[in-house]
Image (tube, rainbow, N blue to C red):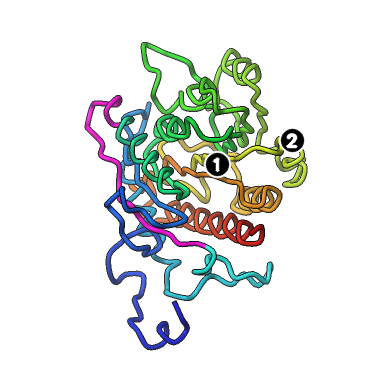
Amino acid sequence: MSSNSYESGRLNLPFVGHCTFAKSPVCTDWEAIDADVAVLGAPNDMGTQWRPGARFGPRGIREASTLFSFGHAGAYDHEDDVLYLAAQDVRMVDVGDADIVHTDMHKSNANIEFAVRKILQAGAMPVVLGGDHSIHAPVIKAYEGHEPIHIIHFDAHLDFVDERHGVRYGHGNPLRRASEMDHIVGMTQMGIRNVSSSNRDDYEAAHAAGSKILSVRDVRRLGSEGVLDLIPQGVNYYITIDIDGFDPSIAPGTGTPSHGGFLYYEVLEIIQALAKRSQGKIVGMDLVEVAPAYDPAGVTSILAAQLLLNSIGFIFHERARAR
């Protein structure tokens, strides 16, 4: 958008117009996606074990994202002296939601996987809005046949449960399911902590699968560069963010809050550093477990939208520099 059209066209304030992610154009014809980034909603919370409500996460995040869509030709960061999200660096569309069939986890997951495959076939980077963390399993499965992936995981919980009472695709299972896929070659799991975490067998299984597990305090001791030193180079990266990886003082709107979590810049700086080191070879993201009903002030949805938009800006700025 030129500065002239910004000054002379509609003001288009956040509370005006259709509520797509960052007011991006809509593309519900998945055979005609023409963009660098495609934002997909996966509003499934049938995998949750306690408080539901993450099915409304995509709507909450989309609404919050309008705060950051005033129509400027990018977002200038004075600390970095960089214009992020410039039109020449990244084109973004909102492709709507995968269809969720109530009580049918198998069909819902198949619909999510299908949608992500369509995005990948179009050459766009998927950014998926959950839903609970169970949605990560079908999302990452859609990358079968693509280059090897190392998963970057921010969460209070390990999510490495194998099976309990026949449940294999709940929100405690997705990283275990991912580890069983041939195209997943490792994981770095950060923020894992305290009594809300998991049992010893799950930790041992994660370590055996090649996962590096860091608590919040580990990350603080290491700093972002120290964390990056532990992440293998030479592969693509996929980032999965459970909003309960953040401290509930800044992210109360989630079904399973866990105190002692990350603050905003701790996560953002790791993502930015990873984008710089890999020249933007981050091939997808999901952000899950935002449940707006538990946060009347909406700060959790705003955190999610702000984190995603900054991350997209970092990734595609580095891709543009690498061209």
Q: What numbered label is drawn on residue 230?
A: 2
User: Does 204 sit left or right of 226 as displayed?
Assistant: left
Residue underneath mark 1: 239
Q: Quadrant of residue 23?
A: bottom left
Q: Secondary structure at mark 2?
A: loop
User: Does 269 sit left or right of 226 as displayed?
Assistant: left
Q: Bounds of the magenta span?
A: 90-108
In which quadrant will I find the C terminus? bottom right
| Residue type, numbered disc 1 | Ile
| Residue type, numbered disc 2 | Leu
Q: Secondary structure at mark 1?
A: strand
Q: Position of residue 44 (x, y in %)?
A: 32, 36
Q: CA distance from mark 2 to mark 1?
A: 16 Å
User: Does 299 sit left or right of 189 as displayed?
Assistant: left
Magenta-drawn stretch contains 164: no
Q: Position of residue 110 (x, y in %)?
A: 32, 30
Front residue of 274 and 195: 274
Q: Position of residue 78 (x, y in %)?
A: 65, 72
Residue situated furthest left in the rendering: 102
Compare marks 2 and 1 and give the one earlier in the sequence. 2
From this view, report whether residue 153 is shown above or below residue 308. above
- Look at 30% across and 35% down and name the residue there: 111
- Look at 61% across and 61% down and name the residue there: 320
